[in-house]
Amino acid sequence: MASPAELRMDQLPSDPLLHILSFLSYRDLVNCSYVNWRLNELSKHNPLWKSLCSKHWLLTDVDRQKNDVSWYCLFKLYYSDLGRYIQYYPVLKTAWEQLKSFLQQKCPRMIASLKEGATEVELNNIEARISCRLPDDYRCSYRIHNGQKLVTPGLMGTMSLSYHYRSEVLLDVETAARGFQQRMGMKYCLPLTFCLHTGLSQCMALESAEGRRMFECFYLCADQTAQDPSAINMFITGSCFSEWFTTYVNNVVTGEYPIIRDQIFRYIHDKSCVATTGDITVSVSTSFLPELSSVHPPHFFFTYHIRIEMSSSASPEAACQLDSHNWRITTSDGNVEEAQGPGVLGEFPVMTPGKVHEYASCTTFSTPSEYMEGHYTFHRLANKEEVFNVAIPRFYMTCPPYRKPMFQTQKTSASFTSRFDDHEDDGDSDGDSDGDGDGDDSGDLKGINMVALEGALCPRHM
């Protein structure tokens, strides 16, 4: 009996064959088109490329109708322009669209500050000018929007205290290139943001140098104990541009960062930091301030925002007034401190049904992290003898990771220059006296950062 003839895949009926092709990537689909005439025709089937256009370029029927081409041709059109960014484009484009949609509802004036995307030629010219390669995720984002105008409020978040204001602008690529650093301590660093009020910037390392990892994002911080002013420490904010940007956008659009007076405030609210006592609810948000901080000497600076609210369903007889506060502060080394005082920041708020009282204060400390908790003491307006406590939930304050430069910060400028020139790429540690380097050319990465505020008055634990 004759053996049955083998059935090749390209001899299958069109429907099952198209179903198989629908599981292929765009690269494999293109490769299939070179096999034979039939697969060439089927691999251009419009529904296949509609799915790929949606996946990689987030395109819809409206986009296809606007261009008046097939889905296959539309994919080729976008690939010819943005193909090098195909790995990043859908994630960054989605982040930008989510952010703009959110801003349109919550703080529309910020939308007007966004710039149109840069061109490939403009980005190539910037690379030639600074003699460094821009990472593809950075280029991709700037093809979508070329940062924003130098205005306040900045897109990348705001923080405000009674004596201090910060608002970070997302720099356009031209302005960023003018701030590109080649000086000792900041070699190959490109600014990402800038605050017009404080001069604070977040930067990205375009090369691995001086203890920084390539494409890492960070706040710079001068070592205040070093003899050499080029000794720069870093508070790490992202391992690469796409992580840095999408994490920030997610915090904005999910409500993690509150909108206050049409500005994005970079307070982080842990949903567990809420406590209800009777009709009164207390919630806490915290924020680390790198611009008021330093790695050396080891002091931390945080601000916290407290919201006190009386339920609108409370009876009028429940009206009360805050008399005092009581804090219990526990540091990471186990020390416990207690602080008491009248009112909050000199105020004695009266709480009535539906009333909300909010205030911000700050704290400095010299251990890697701490948490605070406590209570307020109130009395009823109808009966001053009725005194009761309202719990303040425990909230944690932990600084982001920091990294020290590779050189020993206590050396003189001459010694520093010699060490940098001789050992820029070696695996030495950053000058430990015992010489126990770990071979990591990324410097000394700590789990926790340290901060300081010199000469400023802080209404601590109010």
Image (tube, rainbow, N blue to C red):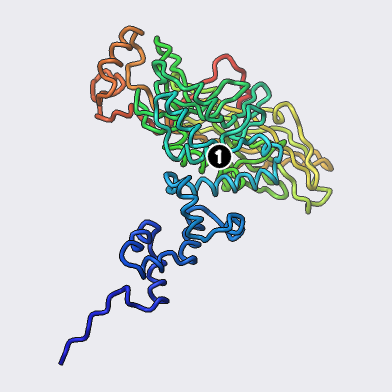
Left/right placement of residue 226 relative to residue 278 reads left
Q: Is residue 232 above or below residue 317?
A: above
Say which residue label 1 marks.
395
Could you say where residue 80 lies in the image, as x and y percent from the top left? 45, 47
Side of 422 relative to 264 (left or right): left
Query: Which quadrant of the figure has residue 84?
Result: top left
Image label count = 1
Element type where label 1 sits in the image: strand
Residue 319, image x, y percentages: 80, 44
Dividing the picture into quarters, in which one does residue 213 lie?
A: top left
Amino acid carrying label 1: it is Phe
Question: Does the rendering let one see residue 368?
Answer: no
Q: Quadrant of the C terminus?
A: top right
Tell me if residue 452 comes above or below residue 31 in the rendering. Answer: above
Name, please, the residue furthest toward the bottom. 1
Q: Indicate the position of residue 449 as horizontal and vertical percent values.
A: 44, 29
Question: Which corner quadrant of the image does residue 289 belong to?
Answer: top right
Residue 72, horizontal then vertical, whole percent: 47, 59
- Check the picture and name the quadrant holding the N terminus: bottom left
